[in-house]
Amino acid sequence: MRIGELAERAGVSVRSLRYYEEQGLLTSTRSASGQRHYTDYEVERVTFIQRLYAAGLSSRTITELLPCVDSPSEENSDAALERMGQERDRLTAHIAELVQTRDALDGLMTSARAHRDQYQAAACA
């Protein structure tokens, strides 16, 4: 199938597929005229790549995980699990930072409301 059909079947843009190829996440064969051609397997691969992106992984991290898919082995599986664990830890730390930022904003909002209420009370007096 050509790139447009793959994009439609996988539910992604043609631009995304080109990006995946640039990043080494996806490969195609080329016709004599240079058109990309894919097999049905690439539909599943693109869907899997999309799931990895949805989990917050970067293309660099996805590249590190794909050997587990391309060459399944205990070693590759262990490496993929270790890498996913590192990403989970990174996300957990980021969530903690976001919670602190939200809490700081809540404190500012509380102060702003108190200041507003004092201003309104003084204006009414």
Image (cartoon, rainbow, N blue to C red):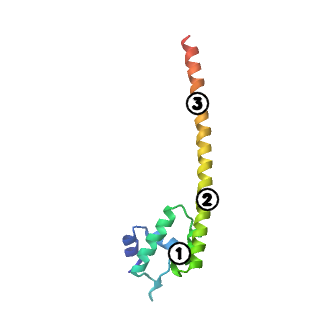
Q: Secondary structure at mark 1?
A: loop
Q: Nearer the viewer, residue 105 or 85?
A: 85
Residue 64 seen:
no
User: Disc 2 marks which amino acid?
Assistant: Asp
The residue that mark 2 highlights is: 89
The answer to the question of whether label 3 and label 2 lie on touching residues, with beta carbons closer than 8 A, is no
The residue that mark 1 highlights is: 25
Quadrant of the rendered image containing residue 38: bottom left
Instruction: Work out whether 13 lies above or below 114.
Output: below
In the image, what residue occupies the spot 50% across and 66% down? 52
Q: Secondary structure at mark 2?
A: helix
Q: What numbered label is drawn on residue 110?
A: 3
The residue at the far top in this view is 125
- Label 1 Cα neighbours within 10 Å, binned few <14 / some 14-19 / many ≥20: some
Q: Which numbered disc flags the more N-terminal residue, 3 or 1?
A: 1
Q: Quadrant of the C terminus?
A: top right
Q: Quadrant of the N terminus?
A: bottom left
- Label 2 Cα neighbours within 10 Å, binned few <14 / some 14-19 / many ≥20: few
* Residue 3 falls left or right of residue 52: left
The residue at the far front in this view is 74
Mark in the foreground, 3 or 2: 2
User: Disc 3 marks which amino acid?
Assistant: Thr
Disc 3 to disc 2, C-alpha distance: 32 Å
Tell me where residue 82 appears, x and y as whole percent.
61, 68
Tell me where residue 15 appears, x and y as whole percent.
47, 69
User: Disc 1 marks which amino acid?
Assistant: Leu
Q: Nearer the viewer, residue 74 or 68?
A: 74
